[in-house]
Image: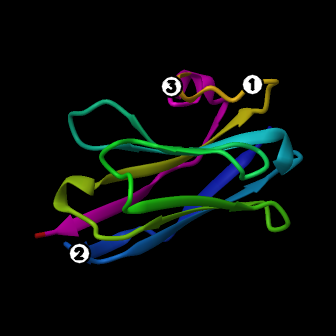
Amino acid sequence: QVQLVESGGGLVQAGGSLRLSCAASGRTFTNYNMAWFRQAPGKERESVATINWTGGITYYADSVKGRFTISRDNAKNTTYLQMNSLKPEDTAVYYCAAAPARGFYSRSYYQRPGAYDYWGQGTQVTVSS
């Protein structure tokens, strides 16, 4: 089992910044690719950003590209999401997720929620206009 605990959400004005953190425990962190998803009320859960186990490959949703940055610190078993230039449409519950690393790193595969075995409890991000 992998336990994931998110932190860093909150209320921010449009144009502001937040940094989310996801602390992992329970299994070897470098055995997992990580991702951030979000879900707004009445909408499906969507991929925001993904990162492979080394941290060398990242993918972003078009809606956040250039504004958000995913990173990981394998020594601290932690994944981060730096969110800049926030917009009201970024308002959602943000979830951290972990998927076992395999012999490939496909954008289409790892942007699917079904690729992930473990999920955090979520952290609310609210952006006011």
Residue pictured at 51% horizontal, 28% vertical: 113
Q: Closer to the camera: disc 2 or disc 1?
A: 1
Residue 122 lies in magenta, yes or no? yes
Residue pictured at 23% horizontal, 75% vertical: 15
Q: CA distance from mark 3 to mark 2?
A: 28 Å
| 34 relative position to 85: left or right | right
Q: Which residues are magenta?
A: 109-128
- The image shows residue 42 at horizontal and vertical percentages of 20, 34
| Residue 104, numbered circle | 1
- The image shows residue 109 at horizontal and vertical percentages of 58, 22
**Above-or-below relation of 129 to 33:** below
Q: Secondary structure at mark 1?
A: loop
| Residue 112, numbered circle | 3
Residue 77 lies in magenta, yes or no? no
The reply to whether discs 3 and 2 touch (Cβ–Cβ < 8 Å) is no
| Residue 72, numbered circle | none
User: Tag 3: residue type?
Assistant: Arg
Q: Please identify the quarter of the rendering in which residue 76 is found.
A: bottom right
Q: Secondary structure at mark 2?
A: loop
Q: Which residue is mark 2?
A: 15
| 87 relative position to 4: left or right | left
User: Which is nearer the N-term, disc 1 or disc 3?
Assistant: 1
User: Tag 2: residue type?
Assistant: Gly
User: Tag 1: residue type?
Assistant: Phe
Q: Nearer the viewer, residue 117 or 18?
A: 18
Q: CA distance from mark 2 to mark 1?
A: 36 Å
The reply to whether discs 1 and 3 touch (Cβ–Cβ < 8 Å) is no
- The image shows residue 83 at horizontal and vertical percentages of 41, 66
Visible residue check, residue 40 = yes
Q: Secondary structure at mark 3?
A: loop
